[in-house]
Image (tube, helix red, strand yellow):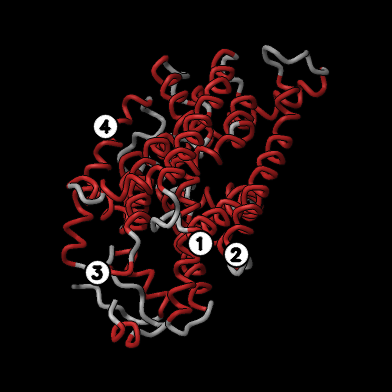
């Protein structure tokens, strides 16, 4: 921006396209596309099937099990982690630019509050796997730490994340020991019975979700979510915000402060540590996944591996993937496909919610009716279709409009005025 342009902007104006950091948009585009691959299972089945392959209709096939393994090692927790890092970086970026224009934190507070409203609507009206409400809740907590310097944010974020993984693992580990599976001594009869009852309750809840989603009308499904899942939501939001989301946001803030996204860090070092983190984490995650497979996917053990033990390895893989994608963005974004990925990233909010609404129409019983019907191989064409749609519409839309439709609405609500959308 020129000096005249800098002097003419006000705190009540959003950033222009020229002010955007391409690496952030490129990585966000990769994440919003890639995260649909694991999420398709949760769109088309109860949430239990997302991490437990035996929750698919009739149990898992060999293809399901090996896709689960690949997803477990390379994707699950990693793309969500990248998204969370980017959200943390975005918090700092937004605050810095508003402050440079003479504004204060009230705009960020309003921005998070409206994100929470979007998240609530998404959770109960469209899909219970929403992450926006969690980001809003965690974002309010992370705002308290935006004044820390980058190195402090990084150190505390890493230590906090590892402590959260330890707490989560310990919380699940007791039940896993009692479940009984190869390699663990026989538990006491009482603890074993309690573990089996807990596992059975997961399956019972999943079957109830299948029944309601397949047969119920949309109002009935919304009512079921409000009564069955609503009461537990506040605890889940606070728990996950504390054990994972806030610390990852802190790390994202630090990476932005330290220059990972704008080329200020040494590229050779980023590349070296990026590959070490991603490949090293994947190599160490693989035995955990094979262990679960060889044990026959006991439900509590699978949950422990998915949400507990492997979480320690998510962080190096998330950091490595973020570094590598940031490096790649500098050349990839100039190509035909990379340019479309950048556009999809600029419209990540619209693409994320748009993808949810599309899958709602495909799967839920009152619409397409495929909920609980397809195995993983049958869902892959839907993933490819959604990718094509996201890449096909984002760039042409941005050729005529300043923002994606939901990005524009969010900005209007944040700045509390009608923003121009046409270029």
Q: Which residue is mark 3?
A: 402
Q: Which residue is mark 4?
A: 381
Foreground pick, 366 / 68: 68
**Callout 2: helix, strand or loop?**
loop
Residue 175 lies in what quarter of the image? top right
Foreground mark, 4 or 2, reads 2
**Callout 1: helix, strand or loop?**
helix
Q: Which quadrant is the N terminus positioned in?
A: bottom left
Question: Is the C-beta separation of discs 1 and 2 under 8 Å?
Answer: yes
Question: Is the C-beta separation of discs 3 and 1 under 8 Å?
Answer: no
Foreground pick, 169 / 365: 169
Q: Which residue is mark 2?
A: 149
Q: CA distance from mark 4 to mark 3?
A: 31 Å
Task: Return the x and y of residue 76 as percentages of the image width and height.
Answer: 48, 35
Mark 1 Cα shell of 10 Å, populated few (<14), some (14-19), many (≥20): many
Q: CA distance from mark 1 to mark 2?
A: 8 Å
> In the displayed structure, would residue 38 be above or below residue 155?
above
Residue 401 lies in what quarter of the image? bottom left
């Amino acid at each position: 921006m020129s000096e005249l342009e800098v002097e003419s902007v006000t705190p009540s104006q959003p950033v222009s396209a020229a002010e955007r950091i391409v690496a952030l948009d490129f990585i966000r585009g990769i994440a919003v596309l890639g995260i649909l691959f694991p999420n398709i299972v949760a769109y088309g089945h109860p949430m239990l099937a997302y991490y437990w392959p035996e929750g698919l209709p009739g149990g898992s096939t060999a293809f399901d099990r090996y896709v689960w393994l690949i997803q477990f090692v390379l994707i699950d927790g990693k793309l969500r982690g990248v998204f969370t890092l980017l959200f943390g970086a975005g918090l700092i970026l937004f605050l810095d630019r508003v402050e440079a224009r003479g504004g204060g934190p009230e705009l960020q507070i309003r921005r998070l509050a409206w994100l929470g409203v979007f998240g609530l609507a998404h959770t109960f009206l469209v899909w219970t796997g929403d992450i926006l409400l969690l980001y809003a809740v965690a974002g309010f907590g992370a705002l308290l730490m935006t004044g820390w310097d980058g190195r402090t944010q990084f150190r505390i974020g890493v230590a906090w994340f590892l402590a959260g993984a330890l707490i989560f693992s310990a919380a699940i580990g007791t039940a896993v020991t009692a479940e009984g599976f190869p390699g663990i001594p026989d538990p006491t009869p009482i603890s074993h019975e309690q573990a089996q009852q807990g596992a059975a309750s997961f399956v019972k809840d999943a079957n109830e979700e299948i029944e309601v989603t397949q047969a119920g009308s949309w109002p009935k499904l919304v009512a079921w979510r409000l009564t069955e899942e609503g009461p537990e939501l506040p605890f889940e939001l606070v728990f996950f915000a504390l054990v994972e989301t806030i610390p990852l946001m802190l790390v994202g803030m630090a990476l932005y402060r330290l220059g990972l996204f704008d080329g200020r860090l040494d590229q050779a070092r980023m590349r070296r540590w990026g590959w070490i983190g991603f490949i090293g984490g994947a190599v160490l995650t693989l035995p955990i996944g094979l262990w679960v497979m060889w044990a026959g996917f006991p439900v509590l053990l699978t949950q422990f591996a998915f949400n507990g033990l492997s979480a320690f390895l998510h962080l190096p893989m998330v950091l490595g993937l973020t570094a590598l994608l940031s490096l790649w963005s500098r050349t990839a974004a100039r190509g035909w496909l990379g340019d479309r990925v950048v556009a999809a990233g600029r419209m990540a909010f619209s693409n994320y919610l748009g993808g949810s609404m599309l899958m709602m129409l495909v799967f839920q019983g009152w619409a397409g009716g495929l909920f609980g019907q397809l195995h993983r191989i049958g869902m892959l064409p839907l993933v490819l279709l959604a990718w094509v749609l996201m890449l096909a519409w984002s760039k042409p839309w941005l050729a005529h409009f300043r923002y994606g439709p939901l990005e524009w609405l969010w900005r209007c609500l944040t700045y509390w005025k009608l923003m121009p959308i046409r270029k």
